[in-house]
Amino acid sequence: MNKIKVLLAEDEASLGMIVTESLESRDFTVFHAVDGEEALQIYQQEKPDILVLDVMMPKKDGFTLAKEIREENKQIPIIFLTAKSQTSDVLEGFNHGGNDYLKKPFSMEELIVRIKALLNRVELKQNVESLKIGNYTFNHTKQILTFNQEEVNLTHREAQLLFYLIEKKNEILDRTFILNKLWGNDDFFNARSMDVFISKLRKKLKKDENVQIINVRGFGYKLLC
């Protein structure tokens, strides 16, 4: 089985070494760059499976690097590393094509979980034509939910929300993550809007009693099926 190739762009030498050694000890192949220009060169040469990019780097920052790579590759997963005080980086990161973010300091276990989750998401999207939810079939590309040959059209946001629920099926979908990802921030009004979309999805999935979207108070939602 081929090793997962990770491009790590991190200019802080000690952190870069720790992350590299930790990932390699878990059977990842890691290419470590110390600035944005070196990271772009490695990306073009090695074609990694996933990018882990520090936001603040010399020569080319993480946002600029991600934007350039996104122009030619829409699919590769990107995780941004941000300083704890840089809360604005979270939203800007998503706007520049990021899929996830980690605030420093972070644990290696959390980074590895997020890497694997994003790679699983890429694999899931490749088979998105026939996603099963109980007795429903969900076509994410066409935004159609089918039950016994009866089709229901979903809005773009409903389809995106359902996709993330399916990806975390029988696990908790983090409320803050999905609000930042689909609504842009996790303020009170967006949270109420998301609750409305969850209610709409529940109605559209009610024909199969074995399919449920439950609230996990204080954490998020869980799709059970």
Image (tube, rainbow, N blue to C red):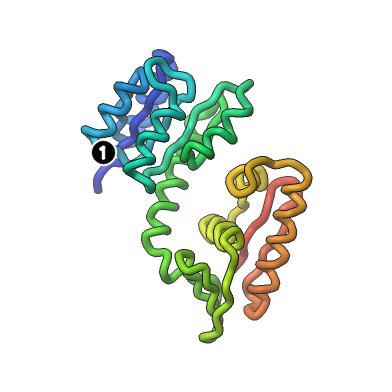
Q: Is residue 138 left or right of residue 214?
A: left
Tag 1 residue: 47
The x and y percentages for residue 167 are: 51, 57
Q: Exactly how many numbered labels are in the figure? A: 1
Q: Can residue 170 be seen at all in this image of the molecule?
A: no
Placement of 121 over or under 41, stated as above or below: below
- Element carrying mark 1: loop
Q: Quadrant of residue 196?
A: bottom right
Q: Quadrant of residue 180?
A: top right
Q: Residue at x 57, y 73 (%)?
A: 153
Front residue of 118/71: it is 71
Front residue of 11/89: it is 89
Q: Are there few (<14), some (14-19), or many (20+) residues within 10 Å of tag 1?
A: some
Q: Residue at x 55, y 84 (%)?
A: 150
Placement of 78 over or under 210, stated as above or below: above
Q: Quadrant of residue 168?
A: bottom right
The x and y percentages for residue 8 are: 37, 28
Q: Is residue 29 left or right of residue 204?
A: left
Placement of 216 over or under 209, stated as above or below: above
Pick out the residue farthest to the left.
Answer: 45
Q: Residue at x 35, y 18 (%)?
A: 34
The x and y percentages for residue 37 are: 32, 22
Query: In what quadrant of the picture does the C terminus appear?
Result: bottom right
The x and y percentages for residue 137 are: 50, 74
**Looking at the picture, which amino acid does disc 1 mark?**
Lys
Q: Is residue 114 left or right of residue 48?
A: right
Q: Can residue 29 be seen at all in this image of the molecule?
A: yes
